[in-house]
Image (cartoon, coloured by chain):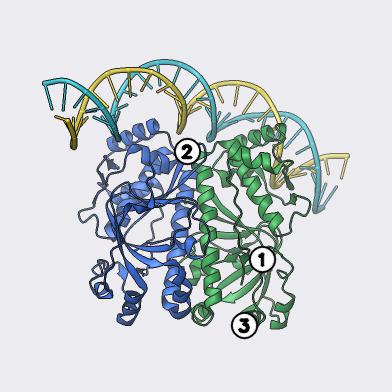
Chain colours: A green, B blue, C cyan, D yellow
Amino acid sequence: MAREDEAGLLVQVGGKRCAQCPLVPYERLSQPSPELRRWIAAFRQGEMRYDRGEVVFTQGSRPRQLYTVLSGILMRSRLLEDGRRQIINFMFPGDFIGLQSAVDSEMSHEVEAVTSATLCVFARERFFELVASQPQLSFDLTWLAAHEESALEEHIVSLGQRNARERLAALAVFLVQRAIDTRLAPDGVLAITITQGQIADMLGLSLVHTNRTLQALRRLQLVDWTLTSIGIPDMAAARQFAGIDGVASARPRPYI
Amino acid sequence: MAREDEAGLLVQVGGKRCAQCPLVPYERLSQPSPELRRWIAAFRQGEMRYDRGEVVFTQGSRPRQLYTVLSGILMRSRLLEDGRRQIINFMFPGDFIGLQSAVDSEMSHEVEAVTSATLCVFARERFFELVASQPQLSFDLTWLAAHEESALEEHIVSLGQRNARERLAALAVFLVQRAIDTRLAPDGVLAITITQGQIADMLGLSLVHTNRTLQALRRLQLVDWTLTSIGIPDMAAARQFAGIDGVASARPRPYI
DNA sequence: AACCAACTCTGTCATTTGACATAGCACAGG
DNA sequence: CCTGTGCTATGTCAAATGACAGAGTTGGTT
């Protein structure tokens, strides 16, 4: 399953490229000031590209890079010694990858591309320099960390309190909502290839039960989830069904 | 269940007190430098004391304070509209509370004291000042956030992949290990009052099933968990049983 | 002593979820 | 056209977990 890190190729790009950063057009992201963008341009190392299934880094490794997702969707998952796998979360454009390596500890999870994806690459060794010289970015990192924590909480609520149908619905709502926020689902349908096995590993269900539950949700017209796309006919109804309180964050997400 | 915030009383204390901070003797914590400690002394507002069951802040609120746990154990939990409750995590001395309010969003959870506890209080409005002027503290906050994320991941793995017995064992190991690290369990036994209902709400099990599983673990001599204490006769065996890879972090935890 | 509240423990039965085996379907490659 | 691969779908049975009801225990209060 796990290939090694050499998958992608680091493309050295001039700082100029930051002015045309693919994240600029996202109106749901808060854009860094021009000076800040120049600083980031000097700070970044380049870009990496990954195809579906390629691994960015493995659990237990100490990557020397930090990343921001520029395009595509990735997932991070944790493996148990006996082969069980738990998918922790999915990552969308603007998300920051590798906080753990930034503070110099082993990664507790692996990250793998779910669609083809490009990442913006930073040097881990210069992380403290970032914190020391750019309080705004430091604050933004804290913002991202706090919101990631909140997303994990929501996932914990799903796994601990919701039944299979509610979990499926909650996950679908989460993914589609994030896709809408990052312009990946213009018409409310997210084109992404996720197998039922992956869904099962995310939600703590067996593959078979995931399959049956998915069919039930289709019958109920709540979620239409196929191998290659996720559709939610009635978002409000789905939120209601999943028991999501649904307050979107007031502030737009920052990114680095 | 939930009382309001006025529970504790803010005690204004001179910065002097930081030199005798109760966290100083913890050899598993990394101590701030003398200058840093002086800065923190000027930054802090005072201390608050909470008794078991008192609520520090509620879900959906926007507290104007941030906290560091000086003594005691607290828990944070998330409530669903229909009354279900999911306990997210427990918090021990040195832990930082309220990152979300630091970046100005509503708290997605409530925090409540499990034992009597004292908290060190900071002003939310001055958080950016902290980030801007104290890169070391900013880095430390990132450290704490990254490790909290890792703890939540572990919890997700429990809920998603482990059966009831493994979950109980994993939780017991986690709590006792953290208690040992913070000198709360000198002899390897943690004296803390946690009801089986609370355990159930943490692990996503019914109260009854929690009870039976607890008894099974006692019979197996793996975990001896009563209303008022948690004991683990053979830590290695318990870790093994729960499927915990068990690499403790190399670096000691920082605190603010 | 009597009472009450908050827990823990037990029994019985229902529901959810998992395990295993197998069939069908789409697609890529020779 | 055949074949292999990876995925989805179904049937049957077993195991894990939950729901409900009630009894036992402990500690505090009057």
Q: Is A134 located above or below residue A98 in the figure?
A: below
Q: Type of residue at label 3?
A: Trp
Per the image, the residue denoted by label 2 is B84
Give the residue displayed 74% in from the left and 41% down from the top: A233
- Whether B29 is drawn above or below A237: the answer is below
- Say whether residue D4 is left or right of residue B189: right
Disc 2 crowd, CA 10 A, few/some/many (<14, 14-19, 20+): few
Q: Amino acid at mark 2?
A: Arg
Find residue A29 and name its label.
Answer: 1
Chain-order first, disc 1 or disc 3: 1
Tell me the amino acid under the disc marked 1.
Leu
For the residues tagged 1 and 2, is the chain the same? no
Label 1 neighbour load within 10 Å: few <14, some 14-19, many 20+: some
Q: Judge the density around disc 3: few (<14), some (14-19), many (≥20) Cα neighbours within 10 Å.
A: some
- Whether residue A84 appears in this view of the structure is no
Where does label 3 land, which residue? A39
Q: Which SS class for mark 2?
A: loop
For residue B231, the mark is none
What residue do we see at 69% from left, 43% from top?
A235
Question: Could you tell me which chain the residue with mark 2 belongs to?
Answer: B
- In the image, which is nearer the foreground, mark 1 or mark 3? 1
Say what secondary structure mark 3 lies in.
Answer: helix
Q: Nearer the viewer, residue B230 or A241?
A: A241
Asked where in the image residue A137 lies, by quadrant, the reply is: bottom right
Residue positioned 41% across, 48% down in the render? B243
